[in-house]
Amino acid sequence: MANYLDGKVAIVTGAGRGIGAGVAKQLASEGAKVIVNDLGASLDGDGTSNTPAEQIVEEIRSDGGEALPNFTDISTMEGGESIVQSALDNYGQLDIVVTVAGILRDRMIFNMTEQEWDDVIRVHLKGTFTICKYASILYRQQRSGRIITFASESGLIGNTGQGNYAAAKSGIAGFTKVAAKDLGRYGVTANSICPRANTRMTQSVPDSSRQLRADRPEDREAAPPIDQMEPDDIAPFVAYLASDQAADVNGQTFLVYGGVITKLSLPRRIRTIFKQGRWDVEELRTLAPQHLTQNLVNPSPPQQPK
């Protein structure tokens, strides 16, 4: 390895398994000292175990890298602050924050409980904010730093049965763009990744939900099946965004899977109707179908474009 991150210190949340584990090992292989954070909870967030984080730390050390396990709950403000402080106490600095941690509690919105909503929002969205908030205080003082968050296509496009997850991931994407604007003047960058990979999250999706999601027109692209997309495929691009070479990459969202990396665009204007003054409903009944909403496809049930 070229040690592009030599001398850097990184925090990676959700680093005990899957994509997060791959990211932690990749950053370490490039020379970074890594705080490997993972509660060791089940997929739905229940229970704790030190084993996942400890195993990844052992793998990193066996390969000649430097890492420490961390078992703090990132969904509390105290947890976010303590992880940042742990990097400072153990390594004297912090340069990179990667927020991969998350849970899954899929349910159709008419069946979803308040607890299922709150827990997913808390772990994904608040868990991203807690660490980024305290890291940003330090980054602002030192005039440098990298934030790499994990959003999702579910948050940008929508997945059946993922109202809580999509809301959290959409929030992360928006939060990251604001972080980029708030912190860019201090030499800090913040970018989001929407990954596709065969993880315990994707493996838990029921066949019925998988089929509904596969029927989306936007999914009918030439892409390998999800079970052929390795979690470790995401890590090299994270390492690139964390490096000094990516100093001018800020406020962007990328889709990453297999050998594919795509820069996603901001929402943009497609069609506009305009008049001086306020529209009335009768005008809109005539003009909107002709100039604004023509050829739109109802996403459910799936339909072919008109």
Image (cartoon, rainbow, N blue to C red):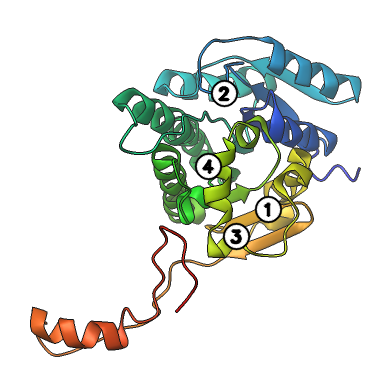
Q: Sequence order check: which comes first, mark 4 or mark 3?
A: 4
Q: Are marks 4 and 1 in contact (CB under 8 Å)?
A: no
Give the residue at mark 1. 256
Give the residue at mark 2. 43
User: Which quadrant is the C terminus positioned in?
Assistant: bottom left
Question: In percent of the image, x 29 and y 88: which residue is there?
Answer: 290
Q: CA distance from mark 4 to mark 1?
A: 22 Å
Q: CA distance from mark 2 to mark 1?
A: 22 Å
User: Which quadrant is the N terminus positioned in?
Assistant: top right
Using the image, determine if residue 90 lies above or below residue 252.
Answer: above
Between 244 and 271, the one nearer to me in the picture: 271
Residue 276 location in percent, x, y? 13, 90
Circle 3 SS class: helix
Q: Sequence order check: which comes first, mark 2 or mark 1?
A: 2
Q: Residues within 10 Å of mark 2 (few under 14, many from 20)?
A: some
Give the residue at mark 3. 219
